[in-house]
Image (cartoon, rainbow, N blue to C red):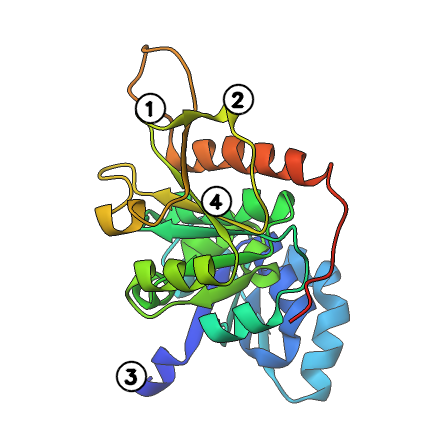
Amino acid sequence: MNKARKAEEQLIYGYHAVKTMLKKRREETLRLFFREDRLETLKPYLSFLSKNKMVYRQVEDEELHKITKSRHHEGLCVFARKLAPKSLDDFIASFRDSRTIACALDGIRNDHNVGAIFRTAAFLGVEHALLTQEGFDSLSPSTFRTAEGALETTNIVACDDFLPKALAGLSEAGFSIVGTDAASGESLARVKFKFPAVLVLGSEQSGMGEDVRSLCETIVRIPGTSSVQSLNVSVASGIVLYEAFRQRSTQKRRTRVK
């Protein structure tokens, strides 16, 4: 396979990740491989692939191991065209709900953490996620599997490789920028979120960058005991996102007028 072709496709494995991809954008399928026990559940999609002369094949487990370089494929995998992220300008121009919540990932690279954050965010109604171009390019098959389909249902906004510039643009557009920190900031129990809002999540090793922190209108922390230093970032994101979701649910939706 030449490098140009490889750069244009994404390997996705995991039952819910693959099924959601086929449900949302089956026309972007390049090659689908599956184990015999997945045939029945894939039949609705196989008829479409066959009609459109797209490649699919039933294979044994060992071949799936080789294709995915993983034993966590859950019996199927697909090569698909890469997701098409939104630009920041398109996102700002198109959002309509005054209660919009977006999340921004600052330096988080662990595949499982990123996937878990997307999964939790989708469950709690977060429809938009900001990633640097580097972060977007590093989305791996493992991230897709851990996200359980959430990468297909979330609008990904690629903001080049300088997150502070994107956050400054969102602030100018009326978004409240809310940062998170394990040790400092206002207790989550006392924070009143203002919407639309962007929740910024920093890496477990270094937290948010100083240039990102300086743009935050509010910084929140999750109070707890001193038994351990902090929570895993995906767990912490779930707690903060739930509180934002809870507060948003008490507000009436208003359509933003451009």
Give the foreground label among 2 and 4.
2
How far apart in space, not on screen, are marks 3 and 2 (Cα)? 50 Å
The image quadrant where one finds the C terminus is bottom right
Q: Which residue is mark 1?
A: 230
Q: Are marks 2 and 4 in contact (CB under 8 Å)?
A: no
Identify the residue under disc 3.
3
Residue with the mark numbered 2: 189
Q: Nearer the viewer, residue 35 or 14?
A: 14
Alpha carbon separation for disc pair 1 and 2: 17 Å
What SS does tag 3 mark?
Answer: helix
The image quadrant of residue 208 is top left
Q: Is residue 188 left or right of residue 150?
A: left
Dot 2 amino acid type: Ala
Q: Earlier in the sequence, mark 1 or mark 4?
A: 4
Label 3 to label 1, Cα distance in Å? 41 Å
Q: Nearer the viewer, mark 1 or mark 2?
A: 2
Residue 218 location (% of width, % of height): 42, 38
Mark seen at residue 8: none
Camera sees residue 82: no
Residue type at numbered disc 4: Ile
Across and down, in percent, residue 35 comes to: 59, 60
**Residue at (54%, 38%) from the top-left corner?**
241
Which residue is label 4 attached to?
Answer: 117
CA gap, disc 2 and disc 4: 21 Å
What's the residue at 36%, 58% (across, down)?
69
Left or right, 200 with respect to 23, comes to: left
Task: Determine whether, in the image, residue 189 is placed left or right of residue 180.
Answer: right
Sequence-first tag of 3 and 1: 3
Residue 97 lies, in percent from the top left, at 68, 58
Query: Residue type at mark 3?
Result: Lys
Residue 41 visible in the displayed image? yes
What residue is rendered at 62% in x and 60% in y? 153
